[in-house]
């Protein structure tokens, strides 16, 4: 059982500002706007829900699948797919997965109510305009914000995860209906679990489907090959790589 724990206000867990040099500060003034952390909550040991408010959010033309990028340290940014749980146009919610000790993980772990941060976006990331209600979705811990943003457009959701129970609990905390429709598969180091993912994605209605593949690069590549071999039209497959082992800066 996972118990949600809210971060304390201020104190030792406040997110570090780590200002960049003069050139970096000039770039930040041109490209970013300031956001305030309204709340930060640990849903499980590794999933955190962070709510940001910025005037610029309410002035933006949002589309499902858009991204925001939060400055974690120096000129290092961490990318999230935001979603809304309320009607406030200037508020966005980020569901993040704390993994490792990189600047992005440190910012997510330490973020606390009252912190301010530099944010770029919203900007276009994953085009979901043409995705119909019969879409299937594959992702992992880094893809849950995108899955929630898709909402009713998903016919079947499949996630690979290091801890399926933890992933399911985190998703259920922000989108119960999405979590009820999702299947979680435990990740194996040899990727043998992807055979199960292939079988689940094959369970589809007679109508042609769109497919949204996201998360780990090698998983996306394998599943894309499988879907095409099974007759899926490449134009109906939307792919978004969020990470790959040994690579930084993917978004």
Image (tube, rainbow, N blue to C red):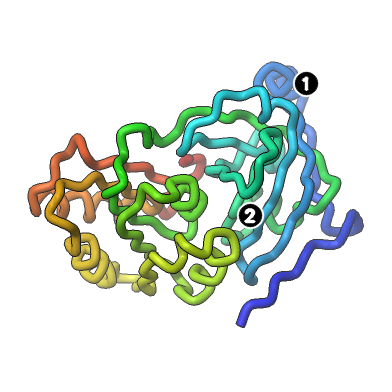
Residue 89 x/y as whole percent: 67, 34
Q: Quadrant of residue 70?
A: top right
Task: Classify the position of the N terminus by image quarter.
Answer: bottom right
Q: Quadrant of residue 204?
A: bottom left
Tag 2 residue: 105
Residue 201 x/y as whole percent: 23, 60
Residue 67 x/y as whole percent: 53, 36
Looking at the image, is 83 positioned above or below residue 127?
below
Nearer to me, 108 or 132: 132
For the point 77% across and 52% down, the residue is 39
For the point 63% across and 29% down, the residue is 120
Tag 1 residue: 22
- Indicate which disc, 1 or 2, sits on the residue closer to the N terminus: 1
Q: Which mark is residue 64?
A: none
Q: Secondary structure at mark 2?
A: helix
Badge 1 density bin: few <14, some 14–19, many ≥20, Cα 10 Å = few
Left/right placement of residue 144 relative to residue 102 reads left
Looking at the image, is 144 positioned above or below residue 53?
below
For the point 78% across and 64% down, the residue is 6
Left/right placement of residue 183 relative to residue 23 reads left
For the point 26% across and 47% down, the residue is 211
Left/right placement of residue 222 relative to residue 101 reads left
Question: How far apart in space, not on screen, are marks 1 and 2 (Cα)?
Answer: 25 Å
Nearer to me, 15 or 18: 15
- Asked whether residue 8 is in view, the answer is yes
Residue 2 x/y as whole percent: 63, 77
């Amino acid at each position: 059982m996972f118990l949600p724990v809210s971060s304390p206000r201020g104190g030792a867990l406040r997110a570090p500002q780590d200002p960049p040099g003069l050139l970096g500060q000039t770039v930040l003034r041109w490209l970013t706007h300031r956001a305030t952390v309204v709340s930060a909550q640990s849903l499980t040991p590794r999933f955190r829900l962070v709510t940001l408010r910025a005037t610029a959010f309410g002035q933006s033309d949002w589309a499902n699948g858009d991204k925001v990028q939060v400055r974690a340290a120096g000129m290092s940014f961490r990318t999230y797919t935001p979603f809304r749980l309320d009607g406030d146009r200037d508020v966005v919610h980020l569901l993040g997965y704390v993994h490792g000790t990189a600047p992005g993980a440190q910012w997510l772990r330490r973020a606390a109510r009252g912190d301010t941060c530099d944010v770029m976006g919203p900007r276009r990331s994953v085009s979901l305009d043409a995705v119909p209600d019969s879409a299937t979705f594959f992702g992992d811990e880094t893809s849950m914000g995108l899955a929630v943003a898709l909402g009713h457009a998903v016919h079947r959701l499949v996630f690979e995860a290091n801890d399926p129970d933890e992933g399911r609990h985190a998703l259920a905390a922000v989108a119960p209906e999405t979590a009820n429709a999702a299947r979680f598969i435990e990740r194996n180091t040899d990727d043998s679990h992807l055979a199960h993912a292939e079988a689940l994605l094959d369970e589809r209605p007679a109508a042609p489907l769109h497919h949204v593949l996201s998360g780990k690069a090698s998983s996306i590549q394998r599943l894309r090959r499988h879907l095409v071999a099974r007759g899926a039209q490449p134009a109906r497959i939307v792919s978004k790589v969020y990470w790959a082992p040994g690579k930084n800066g993917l978004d």
